[in-house]
Image: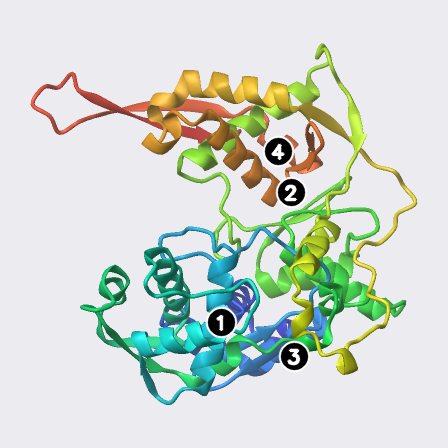
């Protein structure tokens, strides 16, 4: 492991570079910021060896890009593509993103937004279920969101005009983009041609009996998942120490599993606890769930077996959307898909919390602290409950089951949440005018 040979005074720099690579699989001259690429290029040789040795990841570094090609052991729906306004991509935006990337690969050094839209619309017309009509405002907005995603990552750079003006009125607005071909090429290079697949499972890594392969799988889980539950998937002490040395993060080990603790927030894609109504309600709800689970006098202390790996469900959903007309029968891989879930001899049961209790508890939280919530959530109790539970699910603190959720072990670290409502004087004429802000912290 090359990290062990780096002088102690330079180790912090190397660990920062490793965290950047692990959290941003594509790094360009402007994404995620202007200092990331020079930092990674400085440690390119060492990072390339450690990423391959520890995780089986391939790292390619050029003058303009750094691209990490990870190995997928499971599917993860908690990190979707998002628009510049932080809205999650829907299926149409994903389709436009793929078609836009393909069109840029055939273009020259520059292209106008209207020309790009014409090419994408032409390609979309040949795909069943996909259609781009520039006369429809909703289609233009979705297309501009896909273009914006590529622009943020440096695949294209705005040279003149305004994409928003074109989306508002394509007859009056226009935008001209410079194309960075190296970024376009680096963005999409799947391990298998999609036309050769009938199941998304063939994109996943198949674990062998080789101890080195299984160790890499365990290390990958440690850096990719919020919590690694055991005993089958928990890495050994040497693997944990290797990952800790590479990332510079703290390790928290419990009987139920292990997690890397990122107090800096520079590796985590989701910070928790955090600001915002959804994160605040999620933290309050986590505390309430923990108290209920630990309450010996609770009326219902049901436990259930729960599958906390959503891979099978996601595979089925994705496979149902594969267009049969796009698969080349003569080249399709009919081999058995890799197993995505390792069997365990030990049956694990988790405390069950019913939907009715969640509704009642979130309602009580809204009654108590609703005046501090963002306006969009104050009258939407069902929406804020769904968003809070989704956040806790993505953090592997709870898992959804029929009729409610089950509480997972890591949730216990958020019991005993302390709430403070801070009153802030407004800028009005009268000092009695106040606005309320909800603050929370865990003991």
Residue 257 is at least partly visible in this image: yes
- Other-residue count near label 3 (Cα within 10 Å), few / some / many at <14 / 14–19 / ≥20: some
Rendering coords of residue 238 (x, y %):
76, 61
Label 3 and label 1: CA atoms lie apart by 44 Å
Q: Is residue 322 above or below residue 363?
A: below
- Quarter that holds the N terminus: bottom right
Q: Secondary structure at mark 1?
A: loop
User: Which callout, 2 or 3, points at the residue further toward the start of the chain?
Assistant: 3
Q: Secondary structure at mark 4?
A: helix
Q: Which residue does the numbered mark 2 point to in the structure image?
A: 396
User: Which callout, 3 or 1, points at the residue further toward the start of the chain?
Assistant: 3
Q: Which residue does the numbered mark 3 point to in the structure image?
A: 49
Number of the label disc, if any, that sits on residue 413: 4
Please tell me whether mark 1 or mark 2 is closer to you in this view. 1
Question: Could you tell me which residue is drawn at 82 percent across and 66 percent down?
Answer: 337
Q: Which residue does the numbered mark 1 point to in the structure image?
A: 125
């Amino acid at each position: 492991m090359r990290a062990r040979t780096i002088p102690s005074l330079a180790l912090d720099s190397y660990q920062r570079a490793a965290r950047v690579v692990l959290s941003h699989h594509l790094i360009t001259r402007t994404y995620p910021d202007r200092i990331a690429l020079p930092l990674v290029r400085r440690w390119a040789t060492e990072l390339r060896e450690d990423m391959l040795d520890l995780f089986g990841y391939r790292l390619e570094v050029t003058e303009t890009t750094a691209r990490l090609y990870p190995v997928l052991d499971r599917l993860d729906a908690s990190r979707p593509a998002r628009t510049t306004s932080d809205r999650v991509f829907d299926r149409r935006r994903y389709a436009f993103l793929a078609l836009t990337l393909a069109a840029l690969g055939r273009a020259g050094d520059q292209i106008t937004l209207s020309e790009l839209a014409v090419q994408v619309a032409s390609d979309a017309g040949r795909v069943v279920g996909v259609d781009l009509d520039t006369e429809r405002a909703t289609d233009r907005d979705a297309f501009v969101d896909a273009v914006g995603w590529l622009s943020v990552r440096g695949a294209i750079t705005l040279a003149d005009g305004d994409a928003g003006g074109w989306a508002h009125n394509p007859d009056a607005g226009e935008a001209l983009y410079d194309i960075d071909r190296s970024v376009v090429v680096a963005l999409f290079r799947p391990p298998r041609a999609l036309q050769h697949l009938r199941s998304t499972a063939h994109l996943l890594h198949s674990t062998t009996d080789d101890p080195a392969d299984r160790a890499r799988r365990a290390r990958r889980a440690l850096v990719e998942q919020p919590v690694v539950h055991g005993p089958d998937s928990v890495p050994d002490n040497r693997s944990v120490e290797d990952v800790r040395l590479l990332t510079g993060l703290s390790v928290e080990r419990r009987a139920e599993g292990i997690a890397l603790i990122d107090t800096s927030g520079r590796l985590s894609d989701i910070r928790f606890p955090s600001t915002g109504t959804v994160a605040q309600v999620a933290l309050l709800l986590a505390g309430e769930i923990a108290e209920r689970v630990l309450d010996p006098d609770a009326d219902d202390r049901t436990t259930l077996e729960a599958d906390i790996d959503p891979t099978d469900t996601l595979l089925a959903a994705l496979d149902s959307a594969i267009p049969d007309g796009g698969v080349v029968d003569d080249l399709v891989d009919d081999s058995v898909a890799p197993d995505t879930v390792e069997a365990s001899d030990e049956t694990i049961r988790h405390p069950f919390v019913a939907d009715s209790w969640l509704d009642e508890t979130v309602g009580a939280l809204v009654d108590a602290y609703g005046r501090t919530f963002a306006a969009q959530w104050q009258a939407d109790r069902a929406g804020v409950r769904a968003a809070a539970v989704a956040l806790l699910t993505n953090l592997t603190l709870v898992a959804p089951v029929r009729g409610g959720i089950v509480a997972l072990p890591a949730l216990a670290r958020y019991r005993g949440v302390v709430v403070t409502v801070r009153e802030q004087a407004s800028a009005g004429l009268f000092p009695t005018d106040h606005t309320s802000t909800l603050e929370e912290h865990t003991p």
